[in-house]
Amino acid sequence: MKKQILAVAIFTCTVASAQIYTPAGSTIGTTVNPTSSNIGIGTNDPKSTLEVAGHAIFSDIISSGSNSWRFHTPDDGRKTLHIAFRSANDTDYSNWEWDKAFIINGENGNAMAQGKFEAKEIKVTLTPTADFVFEESYDLPKLEEVEKHIKEKKHLPEIASANEMKKEGVNVGEFQIKLLQKIEELTLYTIEQNKLNKEQQERIEKLTLYTLEQNNKIKELESKINKK
């Protein structure tokens, strides 16, 4: 009997501690699942520790100021979560511009920020890299072909045009690899050009030496002729 009383007391305390109280001390709009102690706001069957059905506003998150954020999931079928800053007089849900918020896509794991995105460090994991350029089998484009493409298309081969980037956006990881590919190709062009420059320099030096020798021979011949 004591065990049963103790169990009821523990359950009652658990349920009571799980309630959400208004300043008046009531629990308006909240429910607790008696089998799991899950808390639901706007729902009678919460499936998680806390489930909120509807709009939510969080004020002063880890701060002592007046910051306030709003969270929203659209009702048009998109599996997305929109997070945006809420000003003090921003109370009309119909006027909230959710598409300007930070958006997390639950279907593909993508996140999108409408505006600038700033971070101290970003790590992009994407394979393969562009080291295939240094393989012996890689067909390095001829510079004449690259020049022709640039004249016709006004952008580098395999790199999207400005209009395409503006319309479709840019995948940072893929774009970085493409840029690395072009840098590696440029490195190979530079190496080849350096070899040609060395060969030409050697030819010039040999030609210069030959010219000096010929001049000396001519002078010797002229000197002999003058002596006669």
Image (cartoon, grey):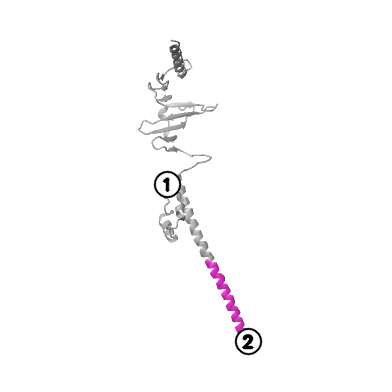
Q: Residue at x 60, y 79 (%)?
A: 216
**The furthest residue to the top:** 1
Chief SS of the magenta region: helix
Q: Residue at x 63, y 87 (%)?
A: 226
Which mark, residue 165? 1
Residue 97 shows in the view: no
Residue situated in front as seen by the camera: 166 or 64: 64
Q: Is residue 197 above or below residue 18?
A: below
Question: Where is residue 86 drawn, in percent x and y?
Answer: 47, 29
Residue 58 shows in the view: yes
**The furthest residue to the bottom:** 228
**The furthest residue to the left:** 77
Which residue carries the number 2 mark? 226
Residue situated in front as seen by the camera: 41 or 84: 41
Q: Is residue 19 above or below residue 108?
A: above
Q: How many marks?
A: 2
Q: Is residue 118 above or below residue 56?
A: below
Q: Is residue 204 magenta?
A: yes
Q: Is residue 201 magenta?
A: yes
Q: Earlier in the sequence, mark 1 or mark 2?
A: 1
Question: Where is residue 140 drawn, in percent x and y?
Answer: 44, 58
90 relative position to 207: left or right: left
Q: Residue at x 44, y 14 (%)?
A: 7
How far separated are the C-alphas under marks 1 and 2? Answer: 78 Å
Question: Where is residue 180 drawn, in percent x and y?
Answer: 48, 51
What type is the residue that disc 1 sits on? Met
Residue segment shown in magenta: 199-226
Residue 149 falls in image quadrant: bottom left
Question: Where is residue 33 drawn, in percent x and y?
Answer: 40, 20
